[in-house]
Amino acid sequence: MTDNQLLPYLPVLLQLLVAAGIGAGMVALSAIIGHRKYSRVKMQAYECGMTPTGDAQHRFSVKFYLVAMLFILFDVEAIFLIPWAVVYKDLLRKFGWFGFWEMIIYIGIVLVGLIYIWKKGVIDWNVDDAKESASGSD
Amino acid sequence: MLHQALFFLIAAMCVAGAINLLLQRHPIHSALSLIVVMGSLALLYLLLGAEFVAMIQLIVYAGAIMVLFVFVIMLLNAGEEEHTRGSRMALWFGAPAVAAIVGMVVYVLTSNSTTLREVHLGAWASTTHDVAMPLFREYLLPFEVTSILILIAILGAVVLARREH
Amino acid sequence: MIETLKFVAFLLLKIVVITHVLLGAVAYTVWLERKLIGRMQNRWGPTRVGPFGLLQPIADGVKFILKEDMLPPGVNKPLFVLAPLLAVALGLTSLAVIPFGETVSQLGKLGALQISGFVRADGSIMDPGVGLLIILAVTSIGVYGIALAGWSSNSKYSLLGSLRASAQMVSYELSLGLSLVGVIMLSGSLSLRQIVDAQAGPFWHWNVFVGLQFIAFFIYLTAAYAETNRIPFDLPEAETELVAGYHTEYSAMKFAMFFMAEYANMFTASCVATLLFFGGWHSPLEGLVKYSLPPLLAALEPVFWFAAKIFVFIFVYIWIRGTLPRFRYDQLMAFGWKVLLPLAIANIVVTSLYVAWRTV
């Protein structure tokens, strides 16, 4: 049985199932045992004791969106670094400094992107001028 | 036997997620169904022994791209959408496209039926090392071009988000 | 067939036992934290329930179960229930890939001290080839628990908290992933067991003392604090401005589940730090001091070292909480993108130079 290459992944799936089962059990236990007493005020969304004003779901700064988008791009970059790191020693042994330079070029190009967003102030969250409020943080 | 059982189980999960994605009215439910699809695709890769690709599928698709989807839905406060009858354009272009894809898959499978063989679950695994060596030698140019693609995407993202007037 | 069933049943037993050990550790970490924070602030912490308040976690657990399980009317019901479930399930899943020792005799057969480890016929241990990536994948999916909790709650504080949390977690996930690249380069593998094996020997073989990897360790630890939403990065639940952040509307066990997930994630982060930078289950004086232990103790010795190292990390978590104030949000984002990320990239370049110098 231990010649099966995928065998070590089976426990991970089982662990996920067991963990989900434990979580579901806790939710169920609390729902069954916990007592209930209805009260209109108690059920209101918490807003420091005030009656909730307006809808909870209003629009937010476009910055959050930008962060998520930049995250994807840099995540893809990071993902490419991982297999490279795995074979880096082999690349060095077989092809010398080639393995080093190919990644320096790659990192260098992506680094230009980081410098660009830095200079553009995309990651500055404290700028609160008129230009910013026009772009959507209402 | 086990391989087939697992394959059909996961494939069913994948298709169910995809159908649910179309049927759900609320965008966040659709997005969650899409995460299920991504997750089952990762499991399918894993069944084929592609451990590295399976994890990348999870990290990049389920973990990064879908976060953006969920984020946008949260940020825009997108509500339930109304069902339309479905556009006629979709039918006219969609149906032939589906037929073409099915035809292509069937053609490739039948024309290669002599060389195709059954896979045994876990008989082999393509390790990270197996994936990485060709990537950083034979496919060096596509790899380096990827970085330029990422750079362009960064510029594009900033420009899109900054277009306020 | 019977063999397979026995195999799966034994595996399930192993999973359930180890998971409950972790849950117990989580409960007592909360106790330890309250006790230590209390002493740091010149208070006693819990003292009433049991000696030294040792029964406090049990009392808390009972209380959480007995409390009213509220479901406020405006919430998106399925997602409101799904969110804490997702958080706990993912928080406990990483445990499966973590190795905490070599082998031990289990029911007459040799078994690996790792849920997903199996002993081959020749005595070597097989574990997931991409174990580290599994942890990264689980971490990256963990964002949904928090994002959905805030979104489905229909409360302003919850939504703001979850937005902050998600943006913070994705920002620091980058530095977290990049800080590990140096270690991967040194060991040339993504299997956690092989990464630890590469550090066997006395403590100066540990990755943290190799090259400039202590910088990578610092980046990792900082990013891990941000990932687990701990002070000084606990803005998503900053009680002075957001009440309780994404779990404001949660009560009873569902509320407790977010805490369990947070502490389980703290344990995972500590485990990864131990495995990647501090030699895993290896004794710091391995090969230096000769001593012989009775068989049972000898088998448990690696587990002891592993647990001791994790305890240190958990202690540091609590210590930091008692010491540092909270970041402001713009500081947090600037720190993640302008300090940690460039530092992580610089670390990769420097480490690759170091590895090249040692290999070529």
Image (cartoon, helix red, strand yellow):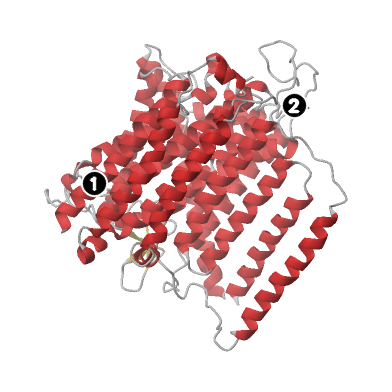
Element carrying mark 2: loop
Q: Is residue B123 left or right of residue A27?
A: left
Category of crowding for the residue at label 1, using alpha-carbon neighbours closer than 10 angstroms: few (below 14), some (14–19), many (at least 20): many
Q: Quadrant of the N terminus of chain B?
A: bottom right
Q: Is residue B3 visible?
A: yes
Mark 2, other Cα within 10 Å: few <14 / some 14–19 / many ≥20: many
Residue displayed at 17% across by 50% down: C286
Which chain does tag 2 point to?
Answer: C
**Which label was assigned to residue C3?**
none
Three-letter amino acid code at the position of disc 2: Pro
- Indicate which label's residue lies in the foreground, 2 or 1: 1
Q: Secondary structure at mark 1?
A: helix
- In the displayed structure, B133 sits above or below C309; it is below
Pointer 1 residue: C351
**Image-based side of A65 in relation to C302, left or right:** right
Q: Chain of mark 1?
A: C
Residue wearing tag 2: C72
Q: Nearer the viewer, residue C189 or C320?
A: C189
x, y percent for residue C43: 40, 12
Q: Amino acid at mark 1?
A: Thr
**Residue at position x 50%, y 23% from top?**
C235
Give the farthest residue toward the bottom.
Answer: B114
Where C354 falls versus C340 (above or below)? below
Q: Tell me residue C139's x, y (percent).
A: 48, 43
Q: Does label 2 or label 1 sit earlier along the sequence?
A: 2
Q: Is residue C31 visible?
A: no
Point out residue C319 in the picture as x, y percentages from the top left corner.
35, 24
